[in-house]
Image (spheres, helix red, strand yellow):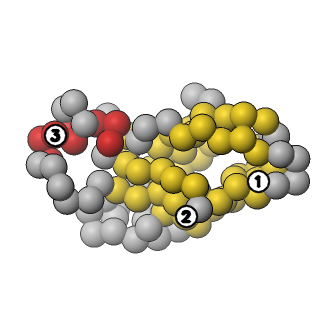
Amino acid sequence: MAKLKITRTSEWHNRMREIGIYLDWQKLGTIANGETKEFDIPAGNHKLKAKIDWCGSRELILSVSDHETKNVTLSGFKQGYSPLYYMTIGRNDYLVIKEG
């Protein structure tokens, strides 16, 4: 069994809300502000996504082998676009997931 370790950055916005973690369109659980969680996942190729309300992240494609731990960082949007962008056409850019 492989492991997925997710670290959510501590941020002012969304600090009171948990973010849902989805692997291959099935909910693994939630993660709170500034929290790090580990999930047991099967080895293989997977699609990882995070969601909060109607907004979320783009899918991250993961390839993980047996007994491997994959480290992922999750954060909210960085100021750059207006909040209206993130609530409409940019709703899948509201959260950012990346390896490392």
**Where residue 85 is drawn, which disc sits there?**
3
- Whether residue 5 is situated above or below residue 83 in the rendered picture: below
Of the 4 image quadrants, the one containing the C terminus is bottom right
Question: What's the residue type where badge 2 is placed?
Answer: Thr
| Residue toward you, 44 or 32 | 44
In this orientation, does residue 31 appear? no
Q: Earlier in the sequence, mark 2 or mark 3?
A: 2
Query: From this viewpoint, is residue 62 visible?
Result: yes
CA gap between label 1 and label 2 equals 13 Å
Helix, strand or loop at mark 1? strand
Label 3 near label 2: C-beta < 8 Å?
A: no
Callout 1: 10 Å neighbours few (<14), some, many (20+)?
Answer: some
Which residue is painted at 16% across and 40% down in the image?
85
Q: Earlier in the sequence, mark 1 or mark 3?
A: 1
Q: What amino acid does circle 1 point to?
A: Lys
The quarter of the picture where residue 41 lies is: top right
Q: Position of residue 14 (x, y in %)?
A: 31, 59
How far apart marks 2 and 3 lie (CA) works out to 25 Å
Left or right, 50 with reference to 86:
right
- Tell me the distance, in whole angstroms, between the alpha carbons under discs 1 and 3: 34 Å
Give the percent coordinates (x, y) of residue 30.
53, 50
Q: Work out whether residue 40 or residue 30 is closer to the camera in this orientation and state it.
A: 40
Residue 10's image quarter? bottom left
- Amino acid at pointer 3: Tyr
